Amino acid sequence: MKFGLFLLLTGASLYGQYIGYPSKNVPRDEKGKPKMDAPAPRTPEGKIDLSGLWETYNEQGKNPLLLINAAMQNKPGEVVMTPTAQEMYTQRQSNNGKDHPGAACLPSQFPEKNAVPHPFKILQLPDLTVILYESRTIYRQIFTDGRPLPVNPVPAWQGYSVGRWEKDEFVVESSGFQDNGWLDMAGHPASKDVKITERFVRKDFGHMDIITTITDPKMYTKPWTMTLKAERLVDTELLEYICEENNTDPQHMVGK
């Protein structure tokens, strides 16, 4: 995909803030190095505590290829688009993705948002979990107070989310998105009726899986799944990220 790097370059973060100021409650060895394989912390209620600063990655490095193609982990035949979705995907590909929301500094929809190689902070409270994304300075609210997902909500870029615990896995269900969303930079589409389920699995202090299932009968013949790996960041902080300040991409996004 020809435009695959523009989102990574537009408004790029001056990575890290408060560098060297030690994060609290971090297990360390005798030299002060974080012990990433230490047990995952727990809340006073006994739940795994997801709180902290995170960033997704993959085996190829810090620029997750799942940002470019969310379906790449699936085998042939596991992600089957409907004719409607295939037509939309083909058009986006042939047009070099010039209509991707990021070209105009509009928000990413997740799972793309989770795959952007910029930090995000999780704040875990008893009845609410908040995710603060450095990229575009966007936030999500995940309600854990027992409320259901809203019926016929005003469409939102990040949708609406509710969460629950299944043993040590934090399960988040989301709906109410904008229509014709982009699940990745390749242009895999999502309709306004898409349902997204995420499972946050913190395996130890420094490592977490985000297992995401896409259910959208209008766009795909069956649900499909992707897994992002996240690493805990320490001794640094989020930066403000205002994409519009230095966005020089729109005039170059001419497509065909």
Image: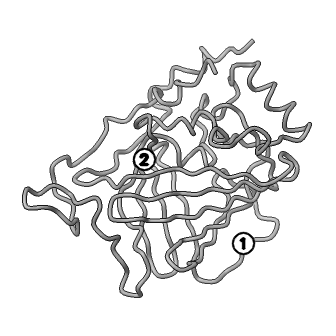
| Residue found at the far left of this picture | 30
Residue 100 placement (x, y as % from top left): 67, 31
| Residue found at the far top of this picture | 256
User: In the depicted view, which residue is nearer to us: 74 or 245?
Assistant: 74
Q: Which mark is residue 159?
A: none
Find residue 182 and report its image quarter. Answer: top right
Horizontal side, residue 99 vs residue 118: left or right:
right
Relative to 2, say whether 228 is above or below: below
Q: Amino acid under label 1?
A: Leu
Relative to 99, say whether 19 is above or below: below
According to the picture, the residue beneath numbered tag 1 turns out to be 149
Q: Quadrant of the C terminus?
A: top right
- The residue located at (69%, 58%) in the rendering is 196
As measured in the structure, the alpha-carbon distance from the residue carrying label 1 to the one carrying label 2 is 26 Å
User: In the depicted view, which residue is nearer to us: 229 or 98?
Assistant: 229
According to the picture, the residue beneath numbered tag 2 turns out to be 134
SS for dot 1? loop
